[in-house]
Image (spheres, rainbow, N blue to C red):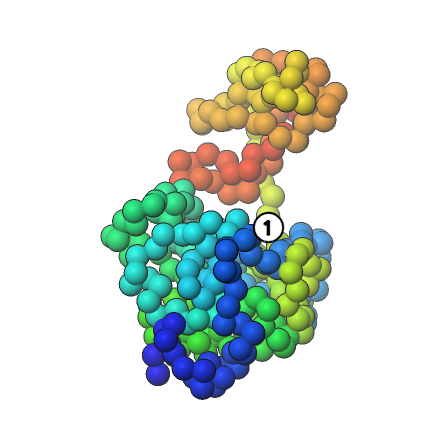
Amino acid sequence: MSLDRRCCLKCLAGLGLGLHELTFAGSAPRPALMEARDASDGIDPRGWLVSEKLDGVRAVWDGQALRFRSGAPIVAPRWFTAALPAIVLDGELWAGRGRFETLVGTVRRQAPDDAAWRDVRYLLFDRPGAPGPFATRAAQLRNLVSQVGVAHLQAVEQSTLDSPAALQRRLDRVVAQGGEGLMLHRAGAHWQPGRSADLLKLKPLADAEAVVLGHEPGLGRHAGRLGALAVQAPDGRRFRLGTGFSDAERAAPPPVGAVVTYTYRGLTEAGLPRFASFLRVRRLP
């Protein structure tokens, strides 16, 4: 059976998709989405479904068009959306690990680059507004993807783990392979909009050191004090640290030549630290 926006109500019912899901956007306001909170250290994953946290672009299929989380349309090639059903889907546009910048360049084009979109997949992880626990919704997504049968539409792989140690091993393995982290969704949770304790993100936080090269002035509420540090890593990479400072540190920033420690979450395609944030000035022994 092929599902597209012309699929019959009988087909939808067979997948457990209700009539309340057949419309979503209208004037395309910002869609209501379920948002994740940060997971606590040592969380027990029993009772949760665990998946990789993808470094992609959140995308909602409103039954007629793909949209960013802002509600703005994503201009995708017709072949990319042709097989999607007339129901609401929530997922991530993804081009592979470590390709976030390339992906953004592709999906933000107003005239879609057909060849570039061939590298993009739409990975589904929920069905906004659908009834039932998350485990049921995840199973329905797997069934839907199987029915649609196109390579670029996939369901995010969900798995169960039996201990905090197993969760840490999974996180370490994903990060070592270039992934961003993990998502945990309570298996019995019903869908609800907004930030929820039933949806958690677990990401590693690495740290490194860099030398201060200069100070960039602040703007707005930081006018008259530090806006960002220009720094250089031991291997010569140069970048900015603009977050993580207290008001006192912005008023009296680390001097040029000081060695500072910063935190970050993985690297960009250019090899620079992602989400780099000032942590402290290194104290010499």
Residue 54: x and y, percent?
49, 55
Residue 228: x and y, percent?
58, 22
Quarter occupied by residue 245: top right
Residue drawn at (44%, 71%), measured in percent from left and top? 86
Q: Nearer the viewer, residue 189 or 273?
A: 189
Residue drawn at (71%, 16%), measured in percent from left and top? 251
Residue 152: x and y, percent?
35, 64
The quarter of the image holding the N terminus is bottom left
CA neighbours of label 1 inside 10 A, class few (<14), some (14 to 19), many (20+): some
The kind of residue tagged 1 is Lys
Query: Compared with residue 226, is residue 74 higher up or lower down, i.e. above or below?
Result: below
Residue drawn at (67%, 52%), measured in percent from left and top? 38
Q: Secondary structure at mark 1?
A: loop
Q: Nearer the viewer, residue 231 or 133?
A: 133
Asked whether residue 115 is in view, the answer is yes
Identify the residue at the far right of this view: 248
The quarter of the image holding the C terminus is top right
Q: Which residue is mark 1?
A: 203
Residue drawn at (59%, 48%), measured in percent from left and top? 204
Quarter occupied by residue 182: bottom right
Relative to residue 123, is residue 82 drawn left or right?
left
Query: Compared with residue 231, is residue 129 higher up or lower down, i.e. above or below?
Result: below
Relative to residue 75, is residue 69 drawn left or right?
right
Residue 93: x and y, percent?
43, 56
Asked whether residue 164 is in view, the answer is no
Relative to residue 219, is residue 155 drawn left or right?
left
